Image (cartoon, rainbow, N blue to C red):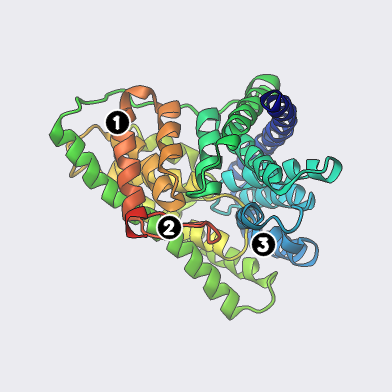
Amino acid sequence: MILVRYLLQWLGFGLLVGILSGSASAIFLVLLDWATETREANLWLLALLPLAGFGIGYVYYHYGANSIKGNNLLLEELYQTKNPIPLRMTFLVLFGTVFTHLFGGSAGREGTAVQMGGSLADQIQKWIPLNAEDRRILLICGVAGGFASVFGTPWAGAIFSLEWMLSGRFRPRSVFPALWSAWVAHVICEWAWGVGHTSYSIPEVPSHSPINLSWILVAGIAFGLAGRLFAETGHWVGAAFNKAISYPPLRPLVGGVLVAGLVYLTDAYAYIGLGIPRILEAFETPLPWYDFLAKIGLTGLTLGSGFKGGEVTPLFFTGATLGNALSVWIPLPLALLAGCGFVGVFSGATNTPMACTVMGMELFGYEAGIFLGLACLMAYLISGKGGIYSAQDLSKKYFWRV
């Protein structure tokens, strides 16, 4: 009887959360495509990035309340369950991210989808009383649905929500709701709304020889260090802006001036926005070795100064272009190294090696699974007890030291 009640409860909640988060992601992706196409057709919009930054900062400062914490608010509420996630978070992060991309900021989309999913999911407990444990599961469902639908990776979305949010506190009761919500959200976004996702491929996978696997471990060290550099850059820039500028809306204004100036002076248009075209190039042809550093710098400056958006797609960019650069020294196929970097740097910066491995297999094919898994594991181990989410509990990361 308890099992039946559990299944019925989470079939219903998961369906509702999946519909909400999948629909929100679909709307977001359509708006993001519009923003990207509009910016690319009107590059002069980059000159307005400082004004857009001030507008985003002003709205968040005066009306955002604790929504300004972003993904860290979801983690805090998962651990402590003190206050409801405000519904305004959905709308603030949606339009804040769209405007960031429209005017040329360097940012991603995962953070937006995850925040929308978590915010929408948490509204349910305002109408249906839930205990602390069920509310945690509801938040996990929202994160799973948002991640799965924005990238088209339902298995990775579910695992990411469990691995990222629980951080060593695995709860078996969360598994079915996370998987169900992720699949519903994916179906709603891609099939019901008809919003597709970028396709990637690794056409050549070498044999699993000891030498080839050893080279991937070497590459994984570089991916882990890059993930740590990405995270530390964002934290350092954020701390510097907070210390130097007391009025929050001025921070993204100044950040916008710096980003726009750097892009204009260096003709670095390939590094703003999501950077999907450059990521696709990384799987096909050699690129400048410094691409990954340029993306780390511009993304850190954009998000650290107060613009909105996610970090994951910039992490994909960083990893794919770093893998591309490593192909000069590591005797493995370029596309394989780009794919391993794509998920490896993500693993190092978010401390979610299982989700990143599964995501790689969903995006690139299961044939490369062993290489992807080794790259993600090594990057995770090398990156240290840090990451892009300051509220993430990493006390049990190196369990053998506890």
Please give left or right for residue 102 compared with residue 167 in the image. Answer: right
Quarter where residue 257 is shown = bottom right
Between disc 2 and disc 3, whose residue precedes?
3
Where is the C terminus found, in terms of image quarters? bottom left
Where is the N terminus found, in terms of image quarters? top right
Q: Position of residue 293 (x, y in %)?
A: 37, 56
The residue lying at 57 percent from left, 73 percent from top is 241
Instruction: Judge by depth and name the residue closer to the eye, 333 or 36.
Output: 333
Q: Amino acid at mark 1?
A: Ile
Q: Position of residue 395 (x, y in %)?
A: 45, 59
The residue lying at 43 percent from left, 50 percent from top is 351
Q: Amino acid at mark 2?
A: Phe
Q: Amino acid at mark 3?
A: Gly
Quote the CA–CA distance across marks 1 and 2. 25 Å
Label 3: element kind: helix
Q: Is residue 150 visible?
A: no
Circle 1 or circle 3, nearest the eye: 1
Q: Which residue is mark 2?
A: 230
Instruction: Judge by depth and name the residue closer to the eye, 202 or 70.
Output: 70
Please give left or right for residue 378 compared with residue 277 in the image. Answer: left
Label 2: element kind: helix
Quote the CA–CA distance across marks 2 and 3. 21 Å
Q: Which residue is mark 1?
A: 370
The residue lying at 33 percent from left, 48 percent from top is 379
Between disc 1 and disc 3, whose residue precedes?
3
Q: Few, some or many C-alpha atoms within 10 Å of disc 1 (few <14, some 14-19, many ≥20)?
A: some
Q: Which residue is mark 3?
A: 53
Q: Is residue 257 above or below residue 83?
A: below
Instruction: Judge by depth and name the residue closer to the eye, 197 or 48.
Output: 197
